[in-house]
Amino acid sequence: MAGSIVVLTGAGISKESGIDTFRDADGVWSRVRIEDVATPSAFVRDPVKVQGFYNARRRGLLDPKIAPNAAHAALARLEAEWPGPVAIVTQNVDDLHERAGSKNLLHIHGELLKSRCFACGDVREARVDLGAESVCAKCGNDGTLRPHVVWFTEMPFFMDEAIAAVRACAIFASIGTSGAVYPAAGLVEHARAAGARTVEINLEPSEVASAFAEKRYGPAGVLVPAFVAELLGR
Ligand code: BV8
């Protein structure tokens, strides 16, 4: 049986689909401050601003022009054709991996197209704007729905599963992430400890590039299909 593959993805894999990254010069954090929109205290202080930030990004993601690119498609093909398990651990809150056909996927920073009720914990699909008028379909409270994303200082989802998968993998590839946000950026250390082959694919060296044995720099839409073709031997 072939060894398992874990792929960590970040905003760079969705850039060629038309979704902004965070820390590039034209990225999301060049326009708004993390402290104002992506922390629990920002939501308490100014829920209208925080909901507006996520409502705009949700509408952007649902724009018919947004579609998975060649890198997302290549990872779906890898999962379908590799003779062992393939898991994607994504920091992205978009749904482009799913749209491309990936199935074994952990959204460790949550999902933009879901809401979570902070009164009853219900999580469900949300493709519309959220705000004070939104009513929870489960408990009936109003104004209690928030985007189902992980804000700074909040615990990411599925980290036990992600770490277990990385510790068991033969190949760990990181694609389109700056390596600036933990605990995701620390996953490569688990891969190294497990003796896995480690590969970084990004436009430029990430903040944790030195932890990777192999590095490939360029657009994900070109490098990821080539990497997958190489792995599949064709
Ligand atoms: C936690 C989701 C445990 C929602 C995001 C001090 C105070 C408080 C906390 C901390 C602190 N110091 C450290 C921390 C921990 C903190 C952290 O890491 N901070 C950093 C910034 C210092 N982490 C946390 O808070 C995490 N939780 O640790 O919980 C805990 C709890 C309580 C107390 C103690 C500990 C939670 C982190 C989750 C934050 N949520 N967002 C949303 O989307 O709005 S983070 C945000 O960054 C993104 O969502 C994304 O998920 C994440 C990673 O970014 P990237 O995906 O890497 O994107 P980036 O723009 O940075 O890079 C893109 C890369 O792509 C670039 O390198 C570029 O060159 C490349 N690229 C561009 N185009 C292409 C390309 N590559 C290839 N092809 C291309 N075409």
Image (spheres, rainbow, N blue to C red):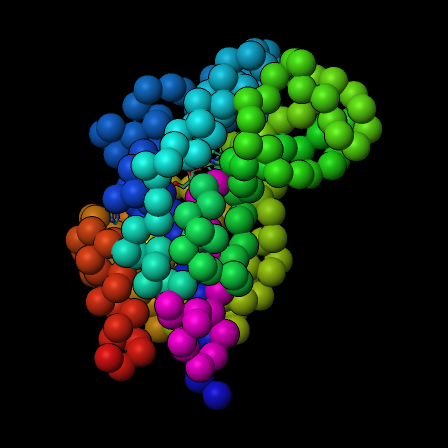
Question: Furthest-front residue in view?
Answer: 64
Compared to residue 74, the image places residue 34 above or below, namely above
Taking the spot 31% from the left edge, 78% from the top edge, the residue there is 232
The C terminus appears in which quarter of the rendering? bottom left
Compared to residue 117, the image places residue 83 above or below, namely below
Is residue 207 found inside the magenta-colored segment of the image?
no
With 66 as the anchor, is 95 left or right in this view?
A: right
Q: Position of residue 43 (x, y in %)?
A: 59, 19
Q: Nearer the viewer, residue 143 or 166?
A: 143
Q: Position of residue 24 (x, y in %)?
A: 26, 34
With 69 as the anchor, is 56 left or right in this view?
A: right
Is residue 127 visible from the viewing direction of this image?
yes
Q: How many marks?
A: 0
Taking the spot 74% from the left edge, 18% from the top edge, the residue there is 142
Q: Nearer the viewer, residue 164 or 127?
A: 127
With 81 as the anchor, is 216 left or right in this view?
A: left
Question: Furthest-bottom residue in view?
Answer: 1
Residue range of the region highlighted in magenta in the rendering: 77-93
Quarter of the image where ligand 1 sits: top left
| Displayed quadrant of residue 73 | bottom left
Q: Nearer the viewer, residue 130 or 3?
A: 130
Question: Furthest-left residue in view?
Answer: 218
Taking the spot 37% from the left edge, 68% from the top edge, the residue there is 77
Is residue 211 visible from the viewing direction of this image?
no
| Displayed quadrant of residue 189 | bottom left
Q: Position of residue 100 (x, y in %)?
A: 41, 55
